[in-house]
Amino acid sequence: MATIKLPEQLPSPAQDSETLRKALDGFMHDGKAVIKVLCHRNATQRKLIRKTYQELYNQDLIDTLQSKISHNFGKAVVWWTYDPSERDARMVKNVLLQVIVEISCASSPHHLLAVRKSYCSLYHCSLEEDIAIKILVALVSSFRYDGEVVDLNLANEEASTLQEAVVVWILSTRNVFQLKATFEAYYEKFGNHLSELESLVKDVIACIASPEKHFVEVIKAATDGWGTDEDSLSRVIVSRAEVDLMKVRKAYYKTSLIKDETSGDYGAFLMALLG
């Protein structure tokens, strides 16, 4: 359930490119104009705008955004402008465990495959080569069946035999609905949650079992305390806006807090993506 709102009458990619050109021309940028265009275009439309901008002005829109807009707003709007698979591939390059877990466990198999292809194209090596931790290699190498099919007998069997030695294999090969049934069966049999395994596996299980709840926890952690973790906040909103951000919004009752924690064009940009 996406949150972005598209205009009823969509301007052409050339018109959007011209608007962005004017907004980014000169010493000061027009953040409101940038938000009005990019926050209300889907991934396919943003890709066309970037292509058209290159053709019209012989400049990469990403490079122009990076040169004209700085700080949190600049980083967030650049992430948003990238094609989703390229964006996730670039995020993974930092080898942040939480990012790798989120992309591996909260993405469709098709998107994960696209991320792996983008990564190889960008960095001339496979994603698997750059991830040294066994569980993460297994997760990004897998291609799970994406249908809502559950075998309750299998769930009970794997809940009984689930040990840390085999948890990687089960987590990387079973579909999300099957895994949720296994987690429930494990709790019924042993009275404790499977997520009590070591911390990395815990993050994997939490992200598979309920992605929206996982991302709510990321937002809470990013906005708790005196400071705000803008990178984590931006990552969640940018990466989930076209996927399930509406579910995250419904699970998180303090969206007004995000507005309070941010300001200026950066805050307006995040609120636009939140719908």
Image (cartoon, rainbow, N blue to C red):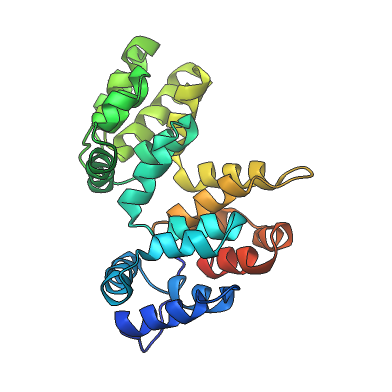
Taking depth in this image into account, of 95 and 165 the one nearest to the observer is 95
Q: For residue 100, what is the image quadrant?
A: top left
Q: Is residue 229 left or right of residue 2?
A: right
Residue 136's spot in the image, x, y percent? 35, 25
Is residue 208 visible in the rendered structure shown here?
A: no
Residue 220's spot in the image, x, y percent? 65, 45
Residue 233's spot in the image, x, y percent? 58, 50
- Determine whether 3 is above or below 85 in the image: below
Taking depth in this image into account, of 83 and 203 the one nearest to the observer is 83
**Number of residue marks:** 0
Is residue 39 visible in the rendered structure shown here?
A: yes
Q: Residue at x 24, y 38 (%)?
A: 120
Q: Residue furthest right?
A: 226
Q: Is residue 223 left or right of residue 106?
A: right
- Determine whether 249 is above or below 191 in the image: below
Q: Is residue 179 left or right of residue 98?
A: left
Taking depth in this image into account, of 220 and 27 the one nearest to the observer is 27
Q: Residue at x 48, y 59 (%)?
A: 66
Q: Residue at x 57, y 73 (%)?
A: 29
Q: For residue 7, what is the image quadrant?
A: bottom left
Q: For residue 131, what is the image quadrant?
A: top left
- Determine whether 272 is above or below 212 in the image: below
**The N terminus - image quarter:** bottom left
